[in-house]
Amino acid sequence: MRNNPLASKVVWRTILTAVAVSIWAGCQGPGDRDSVARNLPPTQSRVLYSIRNIERRGSQANSKGQVFQTYEIRLQYPEFINAPFQSLNQSVKNYVERIRSEFVNDASNLDEETLSKAVLPWTAQMHLSLDYVTDQMASFSLETHVVTGPQDKSVEIQSFNFDVRRRQNMALGDIILPDGLPTVAELVAQEIRQNNEAGLTETDITRVKTTVNAKFINFTLSKELITLHFSPADLGETANSPKHVTLAFHQLGPLINPDMGQLLTPLPTGKPAKPGQSKKSAPKRR
């Protein structure tokens, strides 16, 4: 029987890839656990990445020698294996380390009164939402919830939309043409008014419009959608949890920068939806 050189190459390439992924998944740093290398379906991308977890607990003794567990953290973030994404990896690690360091410093030096009265342990949890990854870009968000008492809760959201061509994170002003930002801001405001579960005032909504119009940075992309992420601080004191406003690309049409054609496929065409105009609702994020 004759050997098929092409088939042999495919088999060896598969074996080598599997070995490389196994080695990478086994290289765990201090405090990192349950990291698993994954590969998106070939129809989307051949980008390899690991999901990293930092899990730590801390304790502290009071003046009587009683030891209390003071904090617990679980931070989840992606780490990409492909070379073009290495600068993104560094940006993500810098951000995660800042969150970890600030929280641990605060929770590791509690005074006697706090130890005796506080509800412990304090907790910090970072959740990863990996929305879209291709050879040309990665789009995901990190949502961190910090609890330091029954009434002391905070939420911070940070998105990363990495353009491989430019080796940098994109802002909304890179996706939307400058003249289109006011229209996008008005569309976002309209979505919030229609789904105003938190009872936001027009003052709150105007603040959101101003934020979006100022090249809003916390958003993620998919093939057909752009999702803007808001923390409670963005939406006013009456909001109890982060909100997500999703717009379909067909609503935006020519407002999108044509230079984004290689990243967003297919590039939307046609007229953008007018604020308040009847339209097919975009899928809601849960």
Image (spheres, grey):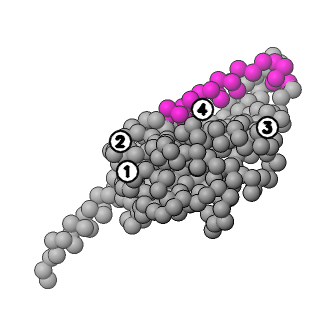
- Lateral position of residue 175 relative to residue 201, left or right: left
Discs 4, 3 touching: Cβ within 8 Å = no
Which amino acid lies under the numbered mark 3 shown in the image of this protein? Glu
Q: Nearer the viewer, residue 14 or 203?
A: 203
Query: Which one is closest to the eye, mark 1 or mark 2?
Result: 1
Residue type indicated by callout 2: Arg
Q: Could you say whether the residue bearing mark 4 is in a helix, strand or loop?
A: helix
Task: Tell me which label, 3 or 2, sits earlier in the chain.
Answer: 2
**Dot 2: element:** loop
Say the numbered circle drawn on residue 166.
2
Q: Going from the N terminus, do you reach mark 1 or mark 2 first? A: 2
Q: Which residue is mark 4?
A: 99
- Marks 3 & 2, CB-CB < 8 Å contact: no
Mark 1 or mark 4, whichever is nearer to me: 1
Residue 110 inside the magenta-drawn segment = yes
Residue at image point 75% right, 53% down = 193
Q: Which amino acid does the dot numbered 4 rest on?
A: Ile
Q: Whole-Å distance between the Cαs marked 3 and 2?
A: 37 Å
Identify the main secondary structure in magenta.
helix
- Of the residues under marks 4 and 3, which one precedes in the sequence? 4
Q: Which residue is mark 3?
A: 237
Q: Position of residue 198 (x, y in %)?
A: 80, 48
Which stretch did the figure color magenta? 93-116
Q: Which residue is drawn at the image coordinates 65% and 29% (left, top)?
A: 103
Percent position of residue 124, x then y:
67, 37
Q: Which amino acid lies under the numbered mark 1 shown in the image of this protein?
A: Asp
